[in-house]
């Protein structure tokens, strides 16, 4: 029987049939049709197929993102296959976050005290290499390594203090760059071609003093100076070649054990020798 408005009310899924077949219906597929067969005193009457105008939302809620990909494991939502995009519909990484303007990925601890926040870079499960971790530990940025997915005690390698000082081998760098090691420690600067390698010691902007540069030029160490050495090569002051010969003055290569240019003076308590050299001594 129908109601006063001529409507027939039916509860889908509770009729005679296989519940498993009803549970297997993909409610996200479109379009969906319903076939209705009525038993009128033993006579089966099939009504015309009727399209669904909207799907049963309670049934589709758990699969609206594709039940074949997203699954629930306890309190966790698990994405079984493909990339996840936030702010982008064509992600090309497992997690791709995009949006207009400046973008940041925030990792924060809601616990007070000594809690840390960080990012771990874990290799495959073969356990044949090192894992790395970047953490914020009490306002100090630390880079650590360990094996077996950090199941052991990690080793600290590099730290950036809140002052901006960088420490390699130390968590408390006392200068802009501090290198610490229990054995020999060194700093390597290498040109991969045939160019010079050098270190610049520059004064502050606006200062009237000179800048200094120490250059390895074809195996000869040269100390050069200028007011703005970043914009010019600078004048040579001291050079030492691979065999230990030393030149004082603007030389490219020393021509003797001690090679002097200009006015030089040798002094000791009782006397001194002063000589002007032109063009060389």
Image (cartoon, rainbow, N blue to C red):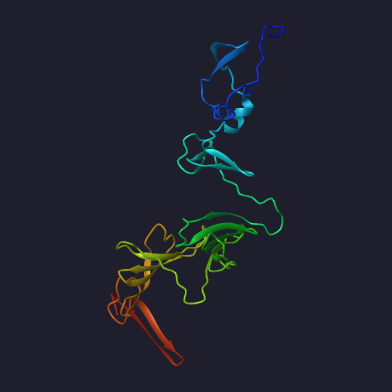
Where 245 falls versus 270 (above or below)? above
Q: Position of residue 188 (x, y in %)?
A: 41, 68
| Quarter of the image that includes the C terminus | bottom left
Where 13 falls versus 260 (above or below)? above
Where 47 falls versus 266 (above or below)? above
Q: Position of residue 158 (x, y in %)?
A: 53, 63
The residue depicted at 64 percent of the width and 23 percent of the height is 14
Q: Is residue 93 visible?
A: yes
Left or right: where does residue 223 sit relative to residue 46? left
Nearest the camera: 118 or 40?
40
Nearest the camera: 246 or 36?
36
Nearest the camera: 258 or 147?
147
Left or right: where does residue 122 sit relative to residue 163? left
The residue depicted at 68 percent of the width and 59 percent of the height is 114
Q: Position of residue 208 (x, y in %)?
A: 50, 62
Direction front: furthest residue = 42
| Quarter of the image that includes the N terminus | top right
Q: Quadrant of residue 12?
A: top right
- Number of labelled discs? 0
The residue depicted at 69 percent of the width and 50 percent of the height is 110
Nearest the camera: 100 or 146?
146
Q: Position of residue 122 (x, y in %)?
A: 50, 56
Direction bottom: furthest residue = 270
Q: Is residue 98 visible?
A: no
């Amino acid at each position: 029987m129908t109601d006063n408005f001529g409507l027939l009310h039916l509860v889908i899924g509770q009729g005679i049939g296989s519940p498993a077949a009803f549970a297997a219906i993909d409610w996200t597929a479109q379009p969906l049709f319903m076939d209705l067969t009525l038993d009128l005193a033993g006579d089966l009457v099939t009504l015309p197929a009727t399209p669904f105008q909207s799907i049963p939302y309670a049934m589709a809620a758990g699969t609206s993102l594709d039940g074949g990909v997203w699954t629930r494991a306890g309190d966790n939502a698990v994405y079984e296959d493909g990339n996840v995009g936030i702010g982008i519909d064509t992600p090309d990484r497992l997690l791709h976050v995009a949006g207009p303007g400046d973008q940041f990925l925030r990792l924060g601890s809601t616990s007070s005290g000594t809690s840390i926040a960080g990012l771990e870079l874990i290799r495959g499960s073969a356990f044949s290499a090192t894992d790395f971790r970047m953490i914020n530990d009490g306002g100090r940025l630390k880079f650590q390594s360990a094996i077996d997915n950090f199941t052991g005690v990690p080793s600290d390698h590099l730290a950036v203090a809140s002052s901006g000082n960088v420490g390699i081998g130390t968590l408390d760098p006392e200068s802009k760059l501090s290198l610490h090691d229990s054995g020999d420690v060194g700093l390597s600067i290498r040109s991969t071609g045939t160019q010079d390698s050098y270190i610049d010691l520059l004064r502050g902007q606006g200062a009237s003093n000179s800048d200094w540069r120490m250059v390895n030029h074809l195996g000869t160490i040269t100390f050069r100076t200028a007011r703005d050495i970043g914009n010019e090569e600078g004048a040579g002051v001291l050079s030492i070649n691979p065999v230990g010969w030393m030149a004082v003055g603007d030389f490219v290569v020393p021509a003797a054990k001690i090679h002097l240019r200009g006015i030089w003076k040798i002094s000791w308590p009782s006397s001194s020798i002063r000589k002007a050299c032109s063009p060389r001594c």
